[in-house]
Image (tube, helix red, strand yellow):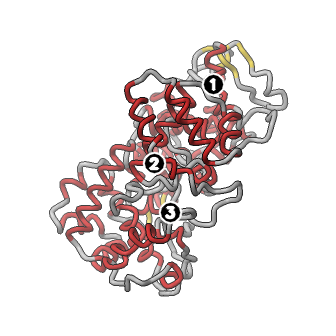
Amino acid sequence: MPNTCAKCKGPAMRRCSGCTASESPAWYCTPQCQKTHWPEHRYECGPTRELTTADHLVRAVHRGRMPDDTATVFQYGLAAAWTKSAAILFEVYVSVIRDLGVSAKKMHQWRLSGPRRLHSELVKRLELHPGERQRFLHTWLAQKPWIFERLSSDREPTTMLAGIPPELIRQYASPALRYAGLPEWYTADDIRNSGMPDFWYYCFCLYVVLLPPHLQRVPGNLFDWVCFGFCTCYDDEAEMRLCDLYGELLDRCSFDEFYAATRTASLASLFNKHGLGAGMRSFPNLEDMLRTSPVSYRIVYLLKQYVLWENVKLYDHVARTFGFAYCRGEREMTELKGLYRRLFVEKRVDPLVLHQAAAKGRLYEVADESCGFRGAEKALFRRLLKEGCPRFVPEDELYGYYYGTSKPEIDLLDLINGTASIIL
């Protein structure tokens, strides 16, 4: 059977020479496809050197989304450059890396030489770009050397707010403390020692995330992304609209009211009560999700979270239900992850369709109808999804249930995102 190009999924005859030890080597149709796919493939191929955060940054640029790797975010100024500035700074990296071809090795060298060197080299490269938008990026970056003044070292940052001035932290935290009815002088330790239940922390942290000009979106690798229904959105634009909708709701209700609705899985009723029901129903499946979340939720959303975001745990029950438990090595795991990513992102398959397919043992048929399997991938996915997955899954086994934990450990990181324990 013909091999499939790892990049464009067409017929391929070029085998990656670096995949000598792999049972499932990568194949490509052209040298261009191989070169374009390298920032992604290098994580699966035989490594020729130790991978750095610059490699993570380059992969994020080619994926077209902000890096999920925590160390990369901090070492390249994307955490300290808050909100709109973070998006613009990422645009700078896209222009320099994707458009001008600056390599991960060179980016890594600039960063190791210090923040001034990184800033000056980026400014110099933007001068070479002919685009009108890049002229704006050049002017913007030239005026903001402070973005790189507090870059994290190679050591993993201990908090999400590492390197941010304390007065800026207080500026963001104070409105959330007032809204939650806590003294404004409360520190992270005071919040941690306040003895509040888990769901209270989720509500508090959602409010902090939504405060302008803060992160403005819920990080996708956290339970909050599932808990409040952001997992039902099809793209970044929809997630931002849902942030706006939650912002309207929080403006119309008290913190205690919002917390009570979260704790009792009645957020859908709260949206209706405050005249935002139509807005809620404009998001497919959001009302369905909020009628049980966060007490219970369909595990297909944990699947979606796992395949779309990095640093997300693959739970055993999810792995068994959706085929990952039957993979033979990392290569097959990556292929299956890529398939589900295609279904969720490119084909926009409704998660409830996959939920129903898993229940009836028809995951292979649904995926084949959407993607049209050919060659080697047809045999692979048939083995994983048709022969491996259960032929029938009871409805209650397609749900995850939140049982809570003892008081979560909260530090400055948790002023932005909570922690959770998910039990399947």
Q: CA distance from mark 1 to mark 2?
A: 31 Å
Q: Percent position (x, y) of residue 35?
A: 65, 21
- Image quadrant in which the C terminus is located: bottom right
**Residue at image x 52%, y 38%?**
341
As rendered, which of 358 and 416 lies closer to the eye? 416
Circle 1 sits in a helix, a strand or a loop, which is it? loop
Residue 22, visible in the rendered structure? yes
Earlier residue among tags 1 and 2: 1
Residue 27 position by quadrant: top right
* Mark 2: few/some/many CA within 10 Å (<14, 14-19, 20+): some
Q: Percent position (x, y) of residue 284?
A: 30, 47
Q: Amino acid at mark 2?
A: Ala
**Is label 1 or label 2 in front?**
2
The answer to whether marks 1 and 2 mark residues whose Cβ atoms lie closer than 8 Å is no
As rendered, which of 227 and 394 lies closer to the eye? 227
Residue wearing tag 3: 400
Q: Amino acid at mark 3?
A: Gly
**Residue at image x 25%, y 55%?**
280
Earlier residue among tags 1 and 3: 1
Of all residues, the one furthest to the right in this rendering is: 21
Q: CA distance from mark 1 to mark 3?
A: 33 Å
Residue 394, visible in the rendered structure? no
Q: Percent position (x, y) of residue 299?
A: 50, 55
Q: Amino acid at mark 1?
A: Ala
- In this image, 398 relative to 45: left or right? left
As rendered, which of 108 and 216 lies closer to the eye? 108
Circle 2 sits in a helix, a strand or a loop, which is it? helix
Q: CA distance from mark 3 to mark 2?
A: 34 Å
Residue wearing tag 2: 86
Circle 3 sits in a helix, a strand or a loop, which is it? strand
* Mark 3: few/some/many CA within 10 Å (<14, 14-19, 20+): many
